[in-house]
Image (spheres, helix red, strand yellow):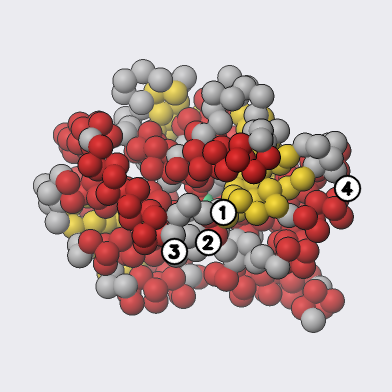
Amino acid sequence: MTPKGHYGVYGGQYVAETLMGPLNELAAAYADAKRDPAFQREFDEILHDYVGRESPLTVCRRLSAKLGGATIVLKREDLNHTGAHKVNNTIGQALLARRMGKKRLIAETGAGMHGVATATVAALLGLPCDVYMGAIDVKRQAPNVARMRMLGAKVVAVEEGSATLKDAMNEALRDWVTNCDDTFYVIGTVAGPYPYPEMVRDFQSVIGREARRQCLAKFGRLPDEAIACVGGGSNAMGLFAGFLDDREVKLVGVEAGGRGLATGEHAASINGGRLGVLHGAKTMLLQTDAGNIIDTYSVSAGLDYPGVGPEHCYLHDIGRAEYSVICDDEAIAAFDDLCRYEGIIPALESSHALAEAIKRAPKMGRDKILLVNLSGRGDKDMDNILNYKKSLGDSASLR
Ligand SMILES: *Cc1c(COP(=O)(O)O)cnc(C)c1O
């Protein structure tokens, strides 16, 4: 990576001139914080005392026995406070905001999980917080809107464009340009202009560092493959960061195939997208020939981002990581399996990563280990799953 955050041809800072000042200030402040042991100590302490880290590794004994091949092992980010990995990043950025003397947090959110994670840390640190959310998402994700409000955040409905995540992010960037003197923009994934992709990866890298250490302690060796779902790509980059230098560990990112790549109704930016610029970075995007962003689709709202973090595109190009596609039906089947065989209700996002492991395990020897990042818990997805099953007339699964 070159200093300005380029990953091969990807990344960079494709922003209006007015944003260069705030981005340079942020990059300098982050570089300074990264070197400061006191900053790291406070971050680690909150992760321990408030989030409940470290999160355990769980061996899926019954599921692995049923599949009859590799052992599936879960990194349990679902057990974090707020129920997913996102809080690791929002704590890091909120501490940085306080260190920079910023008095207000803003965030974008799609499914609402990043909004809730940001509202949570805003309450923890006593900072006011505005969350931009597409008007359609405000309606679709009512429980998370209620959570954000309960935590004291203001939810701003964005009516522009398709009134979804990409429009919310555009509005948040606009707010930031106008109010950057006192406002810190908390981005929810490894996307956006430099230094966000690097900073968010660093804050999430606690997942991979813990998992590597835990694997060595538990099995006396590293996993054969490390698998994570990819929306914007933050939980995957966090996991991969722990194993990038371990060439023998295969890294696998899993994109949302929705109703299938051929239908066009998916959210698979690397497998089904093209090079473009979105939200300040050059990356793989779902866009039309004319360069308009295509609305994404996935049964899992958290994977519904038309772009992907630039570092993933680079890892794909150099062959260090591979990126596969899992469709709605496969993710739902994996969701059912984890519920019934292990007593764990996973998030639909994480179910995509699990589905990939379930495909791979039977083709591998019993001595192999597949490490899956269980990025979140599934309580938030109940309505969604019931509706999906109802639409299929799958009455057997509703018993
Ligand atoms: C938001 C979310 C994701 C997708 O975001 P990434 O940046 O790709 O990690 C995955 N899993 C859960 C549980 C989420 O809430």
Seen in the picture, residue 234 relative to 24 is either above or below; the reply is: below
The residue that disc 4 covers is 68
The answer to whether marks 2 and 1 mark residues whose Cβ atoms lie closer than 8 Å is yes
Rendered location of residue 397, percent (x, y)? 80, 74
Badge 3 or badge 4: first in the primary sequence: 4
The answer to whether marks 1 and 4 mark residues whose Cβ atoms lie closer than 8 Å is no
The residue that disc 1 covers is 56
User: Residue 41: in sight, yes or no?
Assistant: yes
Rendered location of residue 388, percent (x, y)? 70, 69
The residue that disc 3 covers is 81
**Mark pair 2, 1: CA separation:** 8 Å
Badge 2 or badge 1: first in the primary sequence: 1
Q: Which image quadrant for residue 7?
A: top left
Tell me the tag on residue 274.
none
Q: Secondary structure at mark 3?
A: loop
Q: Counting other residues with Cα less than 10 Å from the Cα at mark 3, is it few (<14), some (14-19), or many (20 or more)?
A: some
178 or 287: nearer the viewer: 178
Q: Residue at x 18, y 51 (%)?
A: 98
Badge 4 or badge 2: first in the primary sequence: 4
Q: Which image quadrant for residue 138?
A: bottom left
247 or 331: nearer the viewer: 247
**Mark pair 1, 4: CA separation:** 24 Å
